[in-house]
Amino acid sequence: MFPVIKNDLIAPKLHRLVVSAPRVAVARKAGQFVIVRQGVGEERIPLTIGDADPQEGTITLFVQAIGTSTQKIVNTPAGGSLLDVAGPLGMPTEIKTWGRVACVGGGVGTAVLYPMAKALAAAGNEVTTIIGGRSKSIIILADELAAFSHDLRISTDDGSAGCKGFVTDSLGSLLVDEAVRPQAVLAVGPAGMMRAVAEQTRPYGIHTVVSLNPIMIDGTGMCGGCRVQIGDEIKFACVDGPEFDGHQVHFDGLVKRLAMYKAHEENCRLLAS
Amino acid sequence: MTNNLSPKERLAISRALMPAQDPVARSRNFKEVNLGLDEESAIKEAQRCLLCKSRNCVSGCPVGVSIPEFVGALAEGDLAKAATILQRDNALPAVCGRVCPQEAQCEAECLRGKKGESVAIGNLERFVADWALHHPQQLAPVETAKSRGKKVAVVGCGPAGLTVAGELIGKGHDITIFEALHDTGGVLRYGIPEFRLPKEIIDIEIDRLVARGVKIECNVIIGKTLTLDDLQKEFDAVFLGNGAGLPVLLGIPGENLNGVYAANEYLTRVNLMGAGQSEECTTPIVRGKRVAVIGAGNTAMDCVRTARRLGAEAAMIVYRREEAQMPARLEEVHHAKEEGVQFVMLASPLEIGGDTDDWVRWLRCQKMMLGEADASGRRRPVPVEGETILLDADVVINALGTSANPLLTATAPDLVLNRWGNITVDANAATSLPGVFAGGDIVRGGATVILAMGDGKRAAQSIDNYLKSS
């Protein structure tokens, strides 16, 4: 059993949980995830580890209630517990000193972006963070990101927070100006957004990393359900990823595989849509 | 009851048939297919054993069960004695009685099989093991071994790890099993379907080990949560039985279409997560109307028979050789046929085709024929030029097998692996690292439950020797 220490609602349907998982807290690196099962009979839900405190033995998870099993996770109050937390899984984010890095988060993907951006800033990069979503209510972690970002830019489709427009508009203004053009770009969000970012940076040849969220079960490479086509190769997001070179990802296939259980409830995927 | 029939009387008894659910009814439910022998027919079957001196059946058993002794006790009607012998020799007898390929092991060596039908050793093992599980109070309690003060970590709660645990707890060692999934049993639970091995049997067998003092920690992935190095610091010896790993890909166009599963995913959804088994289950699965399963091993049979139970009108085995070469247990093939499974032989997949939404619609195969024998003695399938077979299919399942999972080994650079990434061991199951032993599919690639258990038994002996000398 993994006790829930804190549970805060930070945006509609989006909760921040602090969970006691001492071994994971020690082993975890930025970019890795855990698989959580709230109780008997529930789905195995992959969730990015937002943050960790090895001394306290806790990890922070951002969970969006999108199906029965995720609803049960967010309904677990402080003092309650999660039955299974397994991890840390996946490859950590490649942390290098690139110089200028743009970190782009769309919607709940911002929660996945947060630990990656934080680790890149800690490694000495000048991080420009660009986050966006449909409206103000789903802009999350702005203060936390501002704390280490050289510049934080917010955009919303309806203009209710930051600039009216898309994150790609904001990124575009960085790319055209050689004086501020980043050496690397990280993008996490809906597949369409990540594809748009990858296409934007491709002409500049800028190293672009995206974090994918395919359907997965075990998270250890056993089931092969999370396979994605990267260039000419098929890779498993759970063990080879979840981060990949955005210029090599076949987004069409990813989007179609994500729709595999649309008729059913689609709730066993990484939190980033 | 005495077991003093004359050889002639023994020879006059014909092999007991295993009662089974009606094929039509069972092809639509997940209940166990084989119903088990009753006591009377089991005892009669046991009396068929000639109690020969050669005891070849024992050498045919990878874990060396004292078969003539337990069968002899059963023939005398002494079920408690039979059960005690069986549980002493085999950590998971109720499992082995169901899933072992007896026809290629103990029963293949049975003297009676030379001129007729062998003693149904597997069915007798199942009968005695099931009786024991349901009558624990009639068995003498297993004596608790005196603690020897040594700690052993077992990685993986599958058949190899459980066997190591069962053997070593009996020798007084302190055992902790680390399991990556949220539940116990490894492939016994996520891989083998309910209709072949009920979960209740796995639960009781594992509860028996826990009652004897084995500790099991789920959700711990060695190589991620903890490393092999961490285990070596905390434990006196380590056994690696982390099992098979990544699915081997087909490597043909269309592999990533929706409705194409690797066998592990298909079976895990159904067996571990309960997809399609009850109304309440939230795990989704694509229920195909026409399901093509590529491969002809036990895993392929499990997939194709599961597909029937999930409602497939046509469930097909697609295999590039002929029926006689299929690696699956005979009983699985026989059961699959009874349940209406179709066998498309001499067909090697070329391409999977889909519709505009990327859902599978067909599987195109190269027509094959058998050519010259290869090094293994099997006739090699060769293409029949210009001839292909087109199968309509809305689900395609790849049951070609698995390759070694690199999660653990990637974080243990000093561990010597073979060129396929499997852990290299010596005849005593010892790896290149002192105090670290390994067995099961992480050593063998894809094999069987009983071979993994044989490895576990051998490794347990080596670990015990190692701990005595360390």
Image (cartoon, helix red, strand yellow):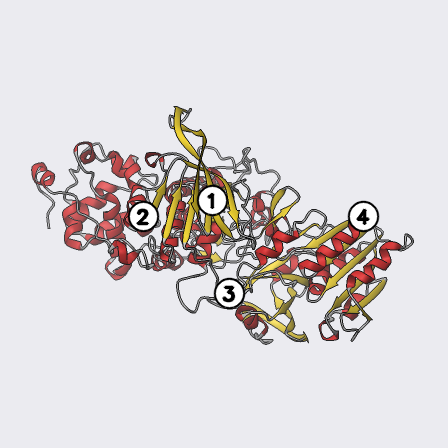
Residue identified by numbered label 3: A264
Same chain for the residues at labels 4 and 2, yes or no? no
State whether discs 1 and 4 lie on one chain.
no
Q: In this rendering, does residue B150 appear at all?
A: no
In this rendering, position of residue B300 left or right of residue B48: right
Residue A44 seen in this snapshot:
yes
Residue A224 pos. (x, y %): 54, 49
Instruction: For marks 4 and 2, give the CA distance.
Output: 56 Å
Which sits earlier in the primary sequence, circle 3 or circle 4? 4
Percent x, y of residue A268: 55, 62
- What's the distance in space between the residues labelled 3 and 4, CA to CA? 39 Å
* Residue at image mark 1: B363
Secondary structure, mark 2, is helix
Left or right placement of residue A263 versus residue A154 in this view: left
Q: Disc 2 marks which amino acid?
A: Ala
Q: Does B6 sit above or below residue B91?
A: above
Q: Is label 3 on the same chain as label 4? A: yes
Chain designation of label 4? A
Tell which subunit mark 3 falls on: A
* Marks 1/3: CA–CA distance: 25 Å
Task: Name the amino acid, label 1.
Answer: Leu
Front residue (pair B197, B6): B197
